[in-house]
């Protein structure tokens, strides 16, 4: 793989640039997203939080760190390489012994409180493999730019989560017929009082879905502090904004929740994206809360401008995921979309999981190629070729275009 700075320098010198298609001159992003203006999301500092390998630092306070792409080719993302995203700066060190989960609210019959041990021993434990992806993953690739953390492609990961079902826990507190939403609050708080507390709500049906979990394990280990120790919500198929970490309160609500992180943030314009899962009590005429992830993929083994040995052929590898229907296919082209080939999918760990894909071409004629991969979900939705702009920079699922050279 050629060094990015050298590659860019080569472009300026008319070196490698001479062999790229015209749009390629601007697409200096090594991942091949054409919208990225030259230099907009240049290399950023790698920095290790306690318990983590060096991750790409976006901000230190609150801690926002993304996963380098080299860790994302595996179907399961390592805990110590899993991305970190917090909105608020005061993140307490929660002790397992003193932690309590309080369940109540105006539409619950009787409030209940659980210790970690109580939660683990009183309810059936279940596992789900599911992708945790920030709504704003790839926001840094939006052109024109939008406000928010300028993530590149690593605000996501896939893990095996183990925990208990809110469905079982809430049955203990009793969900009244009047319930419309269930809210979830974390132990974190803003540095100043005026910062709205991080509280998210779910429609009752999604909160009580058998696949929704209160997880205390991630890939067979306790949750890392930065990923929500001792317990977090897992909302398979839905973007990570709902995956409340350091979960301390669950409230059954008789009215739609109006907190900032529901009513104002995490909204997408009506009609722009395919929506399978609706969140009706939060919808307005102009926007809806973000719900499911869109169908997407990431080529993890190639970089823009990479030179490969033509005689040895080419392998295109990566991961694909969607909003929970399951990945049906990933098609790969080497000629900028004129011909598509179906890749081989890896093991299906769950319909909410990353699915690895690989396509091997044994021998290539020397020349220039433009590699793309496009995932299709079992629900028929696929990736876009042109960015669907929206004010908060969510749901980026533009197909990568990676020019490479075979010699
Ligand atoms: N308590 C709490 N939970 C939270 C958040 C937060 O700020 N506070 N951020 C959410 C968002 S927007 C994302 S993308 C995920 C990130 O999960 P991770 O840090 O485990 O990768 O956590 C979610 N849960
Ligand atoms: Mo997020």
Image (tube, rainbow, N blue to C red):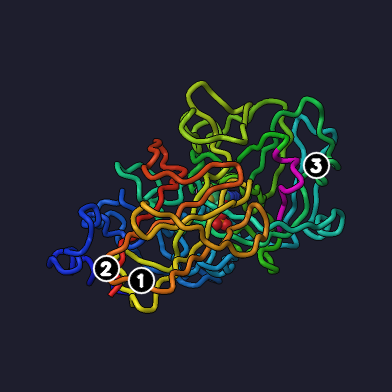
Tag nearer the camera, 1 or 3:
1
Q: Is residue 205 magenta?
A: no
Q: Can residue 377 be seen in this snapshot?
A: yes
Asked if the residues shown at circle 1 and circle 3 are in contact, with their CB atoms under 8 angstroms apart, the answer is: no
In magenta, the rendered stretch is 206-215
Q: How many marks?
A: 3
Q: Is residue 88 visible?
A: no
Q: CA distance from mark 2 to mark 3?
A: 61 Å
Q: Which residue is mark 1?
A: 364
Q: Nearer the viewer, residue 35 or 142?
A: 35
Q: Quadrant of the N terminus?
A: bottom left
Query: Residue at (67%, 60%) from the top-left corner?
Result: 349
Q: Is residue 298 left or right of residue 118?
A: left
Residue 224 in the image, given as x and y percentages of width and height: 61, 65
Image position, residue 402 (x, y; %): 34, 60
Of the two numbered discs 2 and 3 on the same chain, state the one appearing first in sequence: 3
The residue carrying mark 2 is 367
């Amino acid at each position: 793989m050629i060094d990015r700075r050298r590659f860019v320098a080569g472009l300026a010198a008319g070196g490698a640039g001479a062999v790229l298609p015209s749009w390629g001159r601007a697409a200096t992003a090594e991942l091949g997203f054409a919208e990225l203006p030259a230099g907009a999301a240049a290399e950023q500092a790698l920095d290790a939080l306690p318990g983590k390998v060096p991750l790409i630092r976006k901000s230190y306070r609150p801690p926002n760190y993304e996963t380098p792409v080299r860790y994302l080719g595996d179907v399961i993302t390592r805990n110590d390489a899993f991305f970190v995203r917090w909105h608020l700066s005061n993140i307490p060190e929660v002790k397992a012994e003193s932690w309590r989960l309080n369940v109540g609210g105006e539409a619950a019959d009787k409030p209940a409180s659980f210790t970690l041990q109580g939660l683990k021993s009183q309810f059936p434990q279940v596992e789900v493999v599911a992708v945790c992806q920030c709504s704003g993953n790839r926001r840094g690739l939006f052109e024109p730019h939008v406000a928010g953390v300028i993530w590149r492609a690593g605000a996501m990961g896939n893990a095996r989560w183990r925990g208990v079902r809110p469905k079982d826990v809430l049955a203990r507190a009793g969900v009244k017929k009047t319930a419309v939403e269930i809210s979830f609050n974390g132990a974190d708080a803003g540095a100043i009082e005026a910062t709205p507390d991080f509280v998210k709500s779910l429609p009752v049906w999604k909160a009580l879905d058998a696949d929704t979990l209160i997880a205390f394990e991630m890939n067979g280990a306790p949750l890392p502090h930065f990923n929500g120790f001792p317990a977090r919500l897992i909302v398979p198929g839905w973007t990570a904004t709902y995956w409340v970490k350091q979960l301390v309160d669950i409230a059954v609500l008789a009215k739609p929740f109006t907190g900032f992180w529901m009513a104002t943030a995490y909204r997408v314009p009506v009609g722009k994206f395919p929506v399978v899962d609706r969140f009706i009590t939060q919808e307005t005429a102009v926007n809806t809360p973000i719900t499911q992830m869109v169908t997407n993929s990431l080529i993890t083994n190639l970089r823009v401008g990479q030179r490969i040995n033509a005689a040895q052929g080419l392998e295109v590898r990566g991961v694909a995921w969607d909003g929970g229907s399951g990945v049906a296919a990933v098609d790969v082209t080497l000629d900028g979309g004129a011909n598509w080939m179906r890749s081989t999918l890896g093991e299906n760990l769950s319909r909410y999981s990353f699915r690895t894909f690989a396509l091997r071409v044994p021998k290539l004629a020397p020349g220039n190629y433009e590699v793309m991969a496009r995932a299709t979900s079992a629900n028929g939705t696929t990736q876009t070729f042109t960015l669907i702009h929206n004010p908060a920079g969510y749901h980026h699922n533009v197909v990568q275009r990676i020019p490479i050279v075979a010699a």
